[in-house]
């Protein structure tokens, strides 16, 4: 029994000593919390929820009326000659209107890496995810500046907390190509 107690005591000391060494080396922040991104190469989980709606409309209405008229009262020095009066009227109207509306929502979770630590200790992050479904390839890119104190305890951050955020969602494949007008339509739209 005494031998068992000694072995457990030695094993406990070795484990504690190892954990203290890891904590001093900076690889473990705490035994009770998740590691938060703080240095180059660390990863942070970004929860993206972005929604945008934009619309614009314009109306234009123009009109112009021009009228010119005249009368000849003398012809080669002779007055009283009955000559006709003349007149000319020209008018033009234009009206036009246009409306455009765009709406988009992206909901995703993506891992980003710390690529730079800024002088004020903010972190510059960058990440991408490529998803292949059938022959469609969807790509999500994100980059921007985060404050280390905004990172939650589970090492996540919301996309709305990213300064100078650049979020792109792109796709390529048969579905994307079928949404694009044909070459003849594009040429005619360019000409007219």
Image (cartoon, helix red, strand yellow):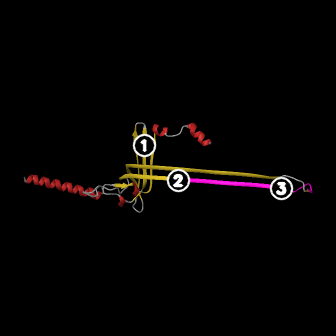
Residue highlighted by disc 1 = 138
The question of residue 59 being in magenta is answered with yes
Q: Which residue is mark 2?
A: 56
Q: CA separation, marks 1 and 2?
A: 29 Å
- Residue under circle 3? 71
Q: Which of 109 and 56 lies nearest the eye of the viewer?
A: 56
User: Is tag 1's residue or tag 2's residue first in the polypeptide sequence?
Assistant: 2
Mark 3 or mark 2: whose residue is earlier in sequence: 2
Q: Is 128 a magenta residue?
A: no
The residues bearing labels 3 and 2 have C-alpha atoms spaced at a distance of 51 Å
Q: In front here: 132 or 107?
A: 107
Q: Few, some or many C-alpha atoms within 10 Å of disc 3 (few <14, some 14-19, many ≥20)?
A: few
The residue shown at (57%, 40%) is 186
Residue 30 point in image, percent of width and height: 26, 58
- Rendered location of residue 37, percent (x, y): 34, 55
Residue at left offset 39%, top offset 39%: 133
Quadrant of the image containing the C terminus: top right
Rendered residue at 43%/39% (across/down): 136
Q: In this image, 178 relative to 39: left or right? A: right
């Amino acid at each position: 029994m005494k031998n068992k107690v000694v072995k457990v005591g030695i094993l406990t000391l070795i484990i504690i000593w190892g954990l203290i060494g890891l904590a001093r080396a900076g690889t473990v922040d705490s035994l009770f919390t998740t590691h938060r991104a703080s240095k180059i190469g660390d990863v942070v989980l970004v929860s993206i929820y972005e929604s945008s709606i934009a619309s614009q409309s314009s109306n234009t209405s123009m009109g112009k009326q021009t009228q010119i008229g005249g009368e000849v009262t003398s012809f080669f020095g002779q007055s009283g000659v009955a000559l006709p009066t003349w007149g000319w009227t020209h008018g033009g109207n234009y009206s036009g209107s246009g409306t455009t509306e765009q709406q988009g929502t992206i909901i995703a979770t993506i891992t980003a890496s710390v690529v730079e630590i800024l002088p004020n200790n903010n972190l510059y992050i960058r990440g991408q995810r490529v998803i292949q479904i059938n022959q469609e390839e969807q790509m999500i890119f994100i980059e921007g500046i985060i404050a280390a104190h905004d990172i939650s305890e589970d090492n996540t951050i919301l996309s709305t907390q990213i300064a100078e955020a650049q979020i792109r969602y792109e796709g390529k494949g048969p579905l994307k190509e079928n949404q694009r007008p044909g070459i003849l339509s594009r040429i005619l739209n360019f000409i007219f």
